Each structure stands twice: as C-alpha cells, then as structure tokens.
Amino acid sequence: GQDTLNGKLIFIRFVWSNTNTNTPHFEQSFSDDGGKTWEVNWITDQTRISENAFKSTAPQGSDAAKTESQPALRNGQHDFDFYFGIWKQHLKRLLNPLTGSTTWAEFDGTIVVRKVWDGRANLNEFEGEGPTGHIEGLTLRLYNPKTHQWSLYWANSKAGVLSLPPAIGEFKNGRGEFFCQDTLNDRAILIRYVWSDITPNSAHFEQSYSDDGGKTWEVNWISTMTRTQDAADKSR
C-alpha cells in the first residue's frame, strides 16, 4: 500500500508466512525509497489454541515513545531549474506494458518548460508525432518545502484530467526518483519515474511499472531530451 509518514510518501508491505501451519507469522515493513529497502516495524507470531482454552488478557502498556534525531532534509526546490526552456524530445513508449510485449511506438516532439513560483513549481507541455499518431501531454510539478519532496502530475489532451495520485519523490546525487501506486487492467501496480544523465543541454527520463511490489520493474516510457540551440543561446 501507499501512505505517508511524517508527511513523506512511503510504501507499506504486509507479509504472511507459515500459513499452512498452526503458527502463522506476520510482518509489516515500511519503505521510503520506492521499495529498494524495507524496515520491519511490526512482527506477530500466532499459535492456534482451542476455543475453551481462550482467556482474555489485560492489554499491555505500550513502549515509551523514543525520540530519534533526524538528519537534515536537503532543500531541493531548485532541482528542476535545469529544465526551464525549450527541448527536443525523442520518446519511446511500450504499447502493452506488463504483458510480455516488446512492441514500442516512437515519437519525436518538442517540450516547453515554464518556471512557476520562482522554481518551486513548473509546468511543461509536450507535443509529438509518431507512427501511431499525434500526442499531447502536460506535466505539473510542485515542491513541498515541509517534506522536501516533489509531486508530479501528468495529463494528456484526450482525457483532460491530472493523474492521481501524483508520483512523489526527490533528487539524490543528481538522480531523481518518484513513485506512486495505481492500477493497470484492474491490478494494483507501482509506478516509478527516474530522471538521470542531467547536463545543461540534455536529460534522460524513464517510466517503469512493477506488479510485484517493486521487486522487478519494466521500463515502458523512455525520453531522451536535448535543449534546442536557440534556447541554449538565449541562456548564455
């Protein structure tokens, strides 16, 4: 599942094991890095007993809350500043994700990225042409100064609505990773956005899906972007 902890997006995992015995085991874990690592925070071991042996027990007191020092969060409100301007994009899109298909459609187009709120938000518009037709898209990105995370919303011109929930995440060491939970063909999936290979005049973006809780990912959207020469000249 997807939830928040201290205002930040996390994934939650429940694991049942030993379910074919009279001593089943249950664990709950949290992940704040899109499922790469998990921290177990709830463990229960259960033993079946007969009904007449059941006796209610007084609830036990909870452990005293522990205050742990938290590392300072990085200020990432200018992480997308590199993207302002006009870009040429080559896009590859997998037509039937998570089906074993290897059929891709390719598009070439233009992206225009505009600064909002002095960089704490931005809006980009994409138009492209390919063998499967014309595509128009829009992305809204919003920075939360409290959690130091970005929320990314996508929309296409055919539907005319922003995607919910947004993909939420942050940049670390020049790489941005953003995650959300959604459905595909009525099945729950995880979605991951990755920004990488960022330079003043080029960038790389990938979208991936996972239907096994983040254990494996299938890339289904690859964008290679190059700043137009006119925009590069104006930025000097």
Image: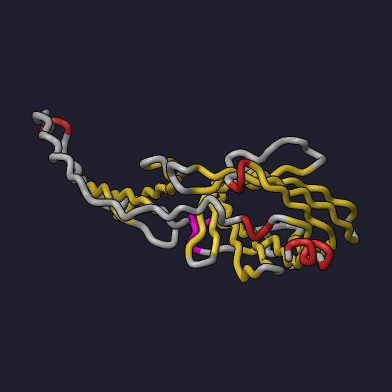
Does residue 176 lie above or below 179 as drawn? below
Seen in the picture, residue 30 relative to 63 is either above or below; the reply is below
| Residue range (magenta) | 211-215
Q: Is residue 185 visible?
A: no
Q: Which residue appears at 13% of the width and 40% of the height?
A: 63
Name the image quarter holding the C terminus: bottom right
Q: Count the labels in the image.
A: 0
Q: Give the quarter of the image for residue 151.
A: top right
Q: Tell me if 37 is positioned left or right of 177 in this view.
A: left
Question: In the image, what residue occupies the spot 89% across and 52% down?
Answer: 134
Q: Is residue 98 above or below residue 77?
A: below
Q: Quadrant of residue 95?
A: bottom right
* Image location (x, y in percent) of residue 76: 50, 53
Q: Position of residue 58 (x, y in %)?
A: 9, 29
Residue 67 in sight: yes
* Color style of the picture: secondary structure
Q: Between residues 96 and 153, which one lies in front from this camera angle? A: 153
175 horizontally vs 75: left or right: right
Q: Is residue 45 left or right of residue 15?
A: left
Q: Residue furthest front?
A: 236
Q: Residue shown at 17%/40% (left/top)?
A: 65
Q: Which residue occupies the foreground of this view, 220 or 25? A: 220
Q: Main secondary structure of the magenta part?
A: loop
Q: Give me the residue at 43% from left, 47% from top.
A: 10
Q: In x, y percent, where is residue 32? A: 41, 53
Specify whether residue 165 is painted magenta.
no
